[in-house]
Image (cartoon, rainbow, N blue to C red):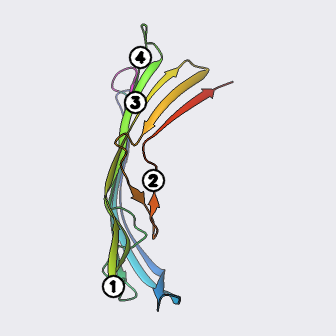
Amino acid sequence: TKLNLFNDRLSATLSYYDITVSDMAQRIDTDANNYFFTQDGKQTSKGFEASITASPVDGLNIVAGYSYNDSQLVAGDASFTGFRPESAGPMNLANVWASYRFTEGALENFGLGFGGNHASENKIFNRTNGTFTIDAYTILNASAFYDAGNFRITLKLDNIANQDYYKGWSTISPQNLRSLSANLTYNF
């Protein structure tokens, strides 16, 4: 479902899904150095996704998103069946970003932004012989910018709390600690 309300001040995309995939390939490890693939897996995924953009007043923009994904391997090798697939990612993902750009006065074209991302735990190894989970995380970010039509200058502070966090899909990938970046954009 797509919505556009209040003269383009609020738009949303909402979707629900219920998907079954058959004949999925699964890697079966026989020991530390040997493996083979089977193609008898079956997976179900049910979920909801929402994306909302709002501009309730001039200068204020809000973008938010959320997804929920309940996945399960329902057929295939016994070491996988009944578990959340390792490729499914976190069950819950959320993001929000709000920015305000002054539209008049001494601060005209100057703006501030704040937001963040959240991911629930992620089971990157999930079988009968064990589970390895990457912890949930919430990261906050902020920015200050000056937007003068032809050019824009932005200072952005990512991972304000300097949190150690990881992403992965059968791997563990450390993400950046607190960082400050500057960006100059010129349109011609």
Q: Name the residue beneath numbered marker 2.
A: 175
Q: Is residue 56 above or below residue 24?
A: above
Start-end of magenta stretch: 56-63
SS for tag 1? loop
Distance Cα–Cα, label 3 vs label 4? 12 Å
Callout 3 environment at 10 Å: few (<14), some (14 to 19), or many (20+)? some
Lower position in the chain sequence, tag 1 or tag 3: 3
Lower position in the chain sequence, tag 2 or tag 3: 3
Lower position in the chain sequence, tag 2 or tag 4: 4
Q: Is residue 75 above or below residue 142?
A: below
Distance Cα–Cα, label 1 vs label 4? 57 Å
The picture quadrant where one finds residue 61 is top left
Question: In the depicted view, which residue is nearer to us: 34 or 46?
Answer: 34
Q: Name the residue beneath numbered marker 4.
A: 102
Q: Are marks 2 and 1 in contact (CB under 8 Å)?
A: no
Instruction: Determine the residue positioned at 43% across, 14% down.
Output: 103
Distance Cα–Cα, label 2 vs label 3? 21 Å
Instruction: Determine the residue positioned at 54% across, 31% down.
Output: 182
Amino acid at pointer 2: Gln
Question: In the depicted view, which residue is nearer to us: 121 or 93?
Answer: 121
* Residue 126 percent across, percent down from the top left: 35, 76
